């Protein structure tokens, strides 16, 4: 009798009830959430106006041969994203509402996961077949490992291969110089969130990089030498379309979090500034103007953020004339 009463109450609240009692799907307005019985892995997807890509992202998760909880947090998209989400019915869990950006959306997921293993897949990226199987096996075989990353490809807007992401073996000091970890290949145990907190939602571009650095200061990452994901790179992509903004935020992040900025990131700022603001290429004007602009901008940023420069910094800047840094 009491079971029948609970069933009727749930139906009156517009809840879809699975007769097995394992899955309940909440479906009200711009949301649809499932409460699953302890899935093996939770994948979090932040989204905003990615209707042209998010279907492929969802399919790449659904095609994994694992028990997965897919939580999608959309920032109130005005394109056809919500229509795409609704078309999947109870296969995914989602909400569409205004948020404070990508990090805020991911944090909503981190605070609501049901499983012990967590992944984060942006709404224009994809998992490769059997990616989750490989990751879960790794965690099973290595109970001492709390966070893992793998290899990935850069894909264009059509999903075609551009290049392999420049992934490297784990080295924290090297990570401070270059972000060699491709975000959609990272998976971690829930204890990581409990120990290190959630993403810094004041960051608009480098929230993932800051999180890896925050964790990496105290804990080694495991490098799984398998291709796990495809990361899209195209003109409207947030990272590619705002290179100067990305580098500026990274400089500020290092200054605030570490008190010191690796010189490589300062010179990296000089490169993207020359390309994006001055529209220069390395070969322009016989290859002379580009390195001059890079050197001047880099030295200015060195003084701005480090309050000093040195003979070593000057020597590195001069090395641009021979393309020294680019060849490393």
Image (spheres, rainbow, N blue to C red):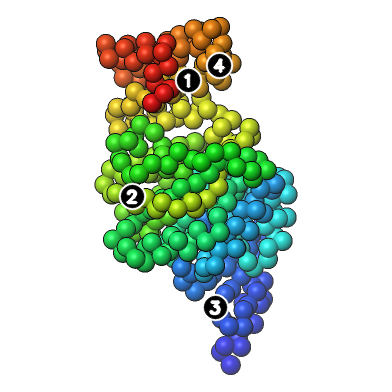
Residue 188 to residue 76: above or below: below
Q: Mark 1 to mark 3: distance in Å?
A: 54 Å
Determine the secondary structure under disc 2. loop
Q: Determine whether 218 is above or below 205 in the image.
A: below
User: Does residue 177 appear in this view?
Assistant: yes
Q: Quadrant of residue 234?
A: top right
For the residues labelled 3 and 2, the Cα–Cα distance comes to 34 Å
Q: Residue at x 27, y 15 (%)?
A: 312
Q: Is residue 93 left or right of residue 307?
A: right
The nearer-to-camera label among 1 and 4 is 4
Dot 1: element = helix
Chain-order first, disc 1 or disc 4: 1
Q: Which quarter of the figure has residue 23?
A: bottom right
Of callouts 2 and 4, the N-terminal one: 2
Which element type, helix, strand or loop, lies under badge 3?
loop
Q: Position of residue 24 (x, y in %)?
A: 58, 73
Are the residues at dot 3 and dot 2 in contact (C-beta closer than 8 Å)?
Answer: no
Q: Is residue 166 above or below residue 226?
A: above
Mark 3 or 2, which is nearer the eye? Answer: 2
Between the residue at mark 2 and the residue at mark 1, the CA separation in whole angstroms equals 29 Å
**Residue 115 falls in image quadrant:** bottom left
Residue under pointer 1: 271
Q: Residue at x 47, y 55 (%)?
A: 119
Residue 281 circle label: 4
Q: Earlier in the sequence, mark 2 or mark 1?
A: 2
Q: Which residue is mark 3?
A: 22
Disc 2/disc 4 C-alpha distance (Å): 36 Å
Residue that carries the numbered disc 2 in the rendered image: 221
Q: Residues within 10 Å of mark 4 (few under 14, many from 20)?
A: some
Q: Residue 176: image x %, image y %?
A: 34, 34
């Amino acid at each position: 009798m009491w079971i029948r009463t609970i069933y009727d109450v749930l139906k009156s609240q517009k809840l879809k009830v699975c007769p097995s009692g394992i899955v309940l799907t909440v479906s009200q307005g711009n949301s649809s959430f499932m409460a699953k019985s302890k899935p093996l892995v939770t994948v979090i997807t932040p989204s905003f106006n990615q209707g042209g890509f998010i279907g492929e992202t969802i399919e790449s998760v659904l095609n994994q041969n694992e028990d997965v909880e897919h939580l999608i947090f959309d920032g109130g998209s005005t394109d056809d994203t919500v229509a795409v989400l609704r078309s999947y019915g109870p296969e995914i869990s989602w909400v569409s509402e205004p948020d404070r950006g990508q990090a805020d959306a991911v944090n909503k997921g981190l605070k609501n996961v049901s499983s012990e293993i967590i992944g984060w897949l942006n709404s224009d990226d994809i998992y490769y077949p059997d990616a989750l199987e490989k990751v879960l096996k790794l965690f099973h075989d290595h109970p001492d490992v709390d966070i893992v990353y793998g290899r990935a490809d850069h894909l264009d807007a059509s999903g075609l291969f551009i290049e392999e992401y420049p992934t490297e073996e784990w080295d924290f000091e090297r990570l401070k110089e270059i972000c060699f970890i491709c975000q959609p290949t990272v998976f971690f145990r829930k204890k990581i969130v409990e120990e290190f907190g959630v993403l810094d939602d004041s960051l608009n571009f480098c929230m993932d990089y800051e999180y890896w650095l925050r964790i990496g200061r105290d804990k080694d990452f495991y490098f799984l030498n398998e291709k796990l994901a495809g990361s899209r790179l195209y003109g409207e992509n947030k990272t590619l379309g705002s290179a100067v903004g990305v580098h500026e935020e990274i400089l500020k992040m290092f200054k605030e979090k570490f008190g010191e900025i690796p010189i490589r990131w300062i010179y990296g700022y000089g490169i993207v500034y020359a390309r994006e603001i001055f529209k220069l290429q390395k070969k322009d004007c016989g290859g002379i103007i580009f390195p001059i602009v890079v050197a001047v901008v880099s030295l200015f940023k060195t003084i701005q953020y480090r309050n000093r420069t040195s003979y070593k910094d000057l020597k590195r800047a001069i090395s641009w004339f021979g393309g020294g840094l680019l060849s490393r």
